[in-house]
Image (cartoon, grey):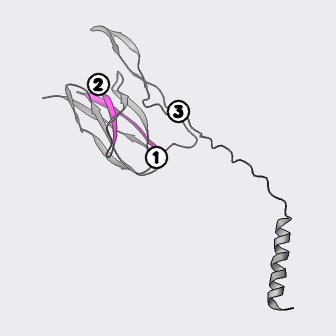
Amino acid sequence: MNMKTKLTLLILFLLSVACNLPTPTPTAAPEPTVSWPVYPTSALTPSFSPTPLGPAILAPTLTPLPTFATPPLGVLARGRVTFNGVGLPGVTIYRKFNAYPNVEIAITDANGDYQAFIAIPSDEMTSIIPELAGYIFDPPFYYWRHYYGYEERAFDFAALPTP
């Protein structure tokens, strides 16, 4: 028997063995599960409260953020806005990604405190900006590079009356 015949018989043998193997039954991959809830855009829950100076005003209160076994991707931003050393309520806090418009993430509570989770799935230049009519802030904003993963950062601001 020559070499071509032997090679042909070997290939036929391997094909016949391969054709008689049991076919595996395909199974669907399990659906991925997320181990943490989706954060709201703001961790503040507004409530109305009367004041001695006039009608009821919007007075947001901080609600605790959930804890996670696996931290989500992004930054937990928290801080305080003060005016003459006293907490300033009603300041709107924005986040801004490079090349995107501002997005409201929180409003300071009666003590001037705020906290919010900002989902950032990858490398991003990020800013935190306070805003309230009649005031300017020191610093005017915070700007940093969030690489990847989870981080907690404090961003405090001092309010000054608009000149």
Asked where in the image residue 116 lies, by quadrant, the reply is: top left
- Which of 98 and 156 lies nearest the eye of the viewer? 98
Residue 73 picture location, percent across and down: 48, 45
Asked where in the image residue 85 lies, by quadrant, the reply is: top left
Secondary structure type for disc 3: loop
Asked where in the image residue 50 lies, by quadrant, the reply is: top left
- The residue to which callout 1 is attached is 121
Sequence-first disc among 3 and 1? 3
- Look at discs 3 and 1 and give the one toward the viewer: 1
Residue type, label 1: Pro
Secondary structure type for disc 1: loop
Sequence-first disc among 2 and 1? 2
- The residue to which callout 3 is attached is 66
Residue at (43%, 31%) from the top-left corner? 41
Q: Residues within 10 Å of mark 1 (few under 14, many from 20)?
A: some
Residue type, label 2: Leu
Residue at (68%, 45%) from the top-left corner? 30
Sequence-first disc among 2 and 3? 3
- The residue to which callout 2 is attached is 88
Residue at (82%, 68%) from the top-left corner? 18
Secondary structure type for disc 2: loop
Range of magenta residues: 72-101
**Magenta span: chief secondary structure:** strand
Q: Is residue 3 magenta?
A: no
Give the side of residue 16 with respect to residue 139, left or right: right
Residue type, label 3: Pro
**Mark 2 to mark 1 CA distance (whole Å):** 31 Å
